Amino acid sequence: MMFSNPEAASEYDLMNEFFLDSIYNTEMFLGGGDTLFQDPTFNSTNLFSAGSTSTSSAVEDATSAVASGNLNGLRANAIMPQAAPSPMIRPASVKPTLEKAKELYYLTAADPPKDGIPEDRMKQVLKAKHDAGLLKPFNYINGYRRLQKYMDENMQASSKQRIQKSLERFRPQFRQKTHQLTDIDLIFVEEWFERSLMEYDRVFAAMAVPACLWRRTGEIFRGNKEFAELIHVPIEHMRDGKLAIYELIAEDSAVSYWEKFGAIAFDPSQKAMLTTCYLKNPDPNAMDKLIHCCFSFTIRRDSSHIPAMIIGNFLPIN
């Protein structure tokens, strides 16, 4: 149980249940363990028949040794350890397939092919990332653990309860839309998310308004330099979940955001909200003052109509 309040069961429980179901379904698809090695070469009859000659000769040698009273040689043979098989030596040029795939992805991402349209180049980068085993379903469980830890350490009990109730609000819709999803479906969602990140790299570079985007659990995966300068953090911290949106806004603003997000998360008729917030530097020892901003956020949903990406724009109010 992620949240201690029984009335505010979190998405953690739902996603955990989903992944357990997914593992069970994978085992059902592959079959039981008895069917994994149905190779005739592993048949016990073949093993004994193949070794019948050597086995019978060993028995004859032992019988003659006992009859002649020469047991020393028999004992020596019995306690002599078998030589360990020599390890297979690979040439230095041979590397595991996964390592080669990772190298290919890094090379493709660093220097994508110049030929073809941008969409084709993007597909090649994503395919290389998938082949390298780096494109996987995102683990939202860790995101909710992080949110819970932050609330426990930095928020009042009343604020935590309001956020938990907001998450509880869309629990039925979330369960309805996720309980039949497979790992392949989630990989397709992650591929769409990665493609969208590449698109917003260009969008953020062209706009002067402070902006960032985050997942539904709050981890920020992109931000422009204007937003980084506004809160006085390095632009490198605006990637890959190093920061979360609720770590950058005041407590009252965080509660207001989660309540508004919970109200429209699964409402197909709404995708944007205009409000205000107070931004802050994530460093608790920072001397920066709170920054009052006009704040709008837009929800982008995946193919299953589940909120997957939130884009926020911040306009400081003098």
Image: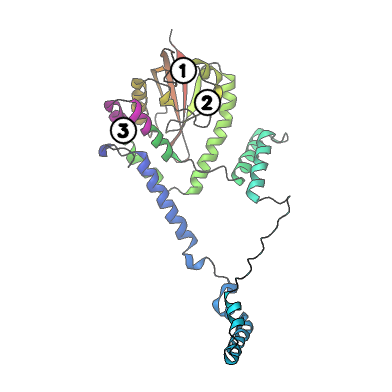
Magenta span main SS? helix
Residue at label 1?
Answer: 314
Between circles 2 and 3, the one closer to the viewer is 2
x, y (%) of residue 168?
31, 36
Q: Vertically, is 260 above or below 52?
A: above
Q: Residue at x 47, y 37 (%)?
A: 302
Given the current orientation, which residue lies at the most extreme top position? 318
Q: Secondary structure at mark 2?
A: helix
Q: Residue at x 58, y 84 (%)?
A: 71
Residue at label 3?
Answer: 164
Between circles 1 and 3, the one closer to the viewer is 3
User: CA gap, disc 2 to disc 1?
Assistant: 17 Å
x, y (%) of residue 69?
58, 89
Does the stretch in magenta take in 156?
yes
The magenta stretch spans which residues? 148-164
Does the stretch in magenta take in 169?
no
Q: Is residue 263 visible?
A: no
Q: Residue at x 44, y 16 (%)?
A: 286
The answer to whether 215 appears left or right of 75 in the picture is: left
Q: Secondary structure at mark 1?
A: strand
Give residue 237's mark.
2
x, y (%) of residue 24?
42, 56
Q: Vertically, is 274 above or below 102?
A: above
The answer to whether 128 appears left or right of 268 in the picture is: right
On-image quarter of the N terminus: top left
Q: Which residue type carries mark 3? A: Gln
Q: Which residue type carries mark 1? A: Phe
